[in-house]
Every structure is written in C-alpha cells, then in structure tokens.
Image (cartoon, rainbow, N blue to C red):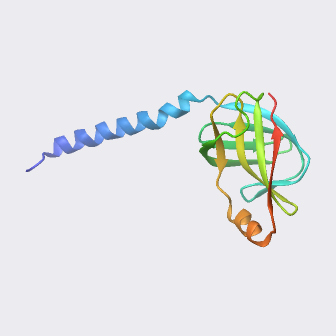
Amino acid sequence: MKVSRDKVIAFAAAMAVTMLAVVSVPVVAHAQAVMKVTIPFDFYVGSQSFPAGDYQVQVSNAYVKVFDAKGHSSFALTTPVANRGAIGDGNGQLVFSRYDSYYFLSEVRRGGYSTAQGLTPSHLEVQTAKNSGEKQQLAFGLKQ
C-alpha cells in the first residue's frame, strides 16, 4: 500500500496539534501558585545550595521554582506523586529529605490537591544518601 506525501504531512500535522493540546491541558488545569516559607536550615534544591531564610516557592504541575529577595534561585522539574499530607491542609508544605546535616527539597504539597510535586533526587543527594546512615523527612508549612 502506497501512502501519498500529502497524507503523511497531514497526518504529522494532526499529530503535532494533538500532542500540543494534550501537553497544554495540565498546565491550564492547575494554576501556578506562589507561596512563602521560612526555612531555618541550609538546604539544597537539586545540587543548588541555599542558606536558611525566607523564600518564595512558585509551584505548577510540572516544576518548582524556589527564590528569595537576595538573588538565590533554582528551578526543578517535578513529577506527580501522592499527596500524603496537604489535602485541605492550608496552603501546603515543603518536604525535605535529611541525611545527617544535609537537607534536600524532595516534595511540594499543595492544599486541596490530591497529587503533590516530587523532585527527582540529584546526583549530590544520591551520593549523600549512600554515605549517610538514615534518611528523615521534615515538612514545613507554606503560606500565601
């Protein structure tokens, strides 16, 4: 069976439009939110280190951006995970994984959502976890 060039181009164009529509839907469905949090310890977002202090957290269904007024900023892609703590619980929580004295942002939970945004562990976090004894998780409340 021979397919004409025009049919192949039309099919490719239709697929591109369909893919764009599918990718765009989640972004529209979940509005971005910017929340504030005070973090009392130095921490990491991926491999980027941050000092203790006041931060703003911008959350969408595909990424998290953490920044402060002093120019510290990091952007991390996220994946949906079960929201195990912030459904209907105020504005949400930042969850940190702690290995000895190292803290890594691991999850962002938003109040009213059934899914949270999980960060993939960075190479630094994986190495720290291997060299550490025990992993603990700490959650800090977000405020608007």
* Residue shown at the point (62%, 28%) measured from the top left: 31
Residue 61 drawn at (x, y percent): 60, 38
Left or right? Give the position of 10 relative to 99: left
Residue 53 drawn at (x, y percent): 90, 44
Left or right? Give the position of 102 relative to 74: right
* Residue shown at the point (65%, 47%) measured from the top left: 118
* Residue shown at the point (83%, 54%) measured from the top left: 43
Residue lying farthest left?
1
* Residue shown at the point (54%, 28%) measured from the top left: 28
Quadrant containing the C terminus in the rendered view: top right
- 136 or 126, which lies in front? 136
Left or right? Give the position of 88 relative to 132: left
Height in image: 65 above or below 104? above
- 143 or 8, which lies in front? 143
How many numbered discs, if any? Answer: 0
Residue 30 drawn at (x, y percent): 59, 30
Height in image: 42 above or below 90? below
Quadrant assignment, res 81 = top right
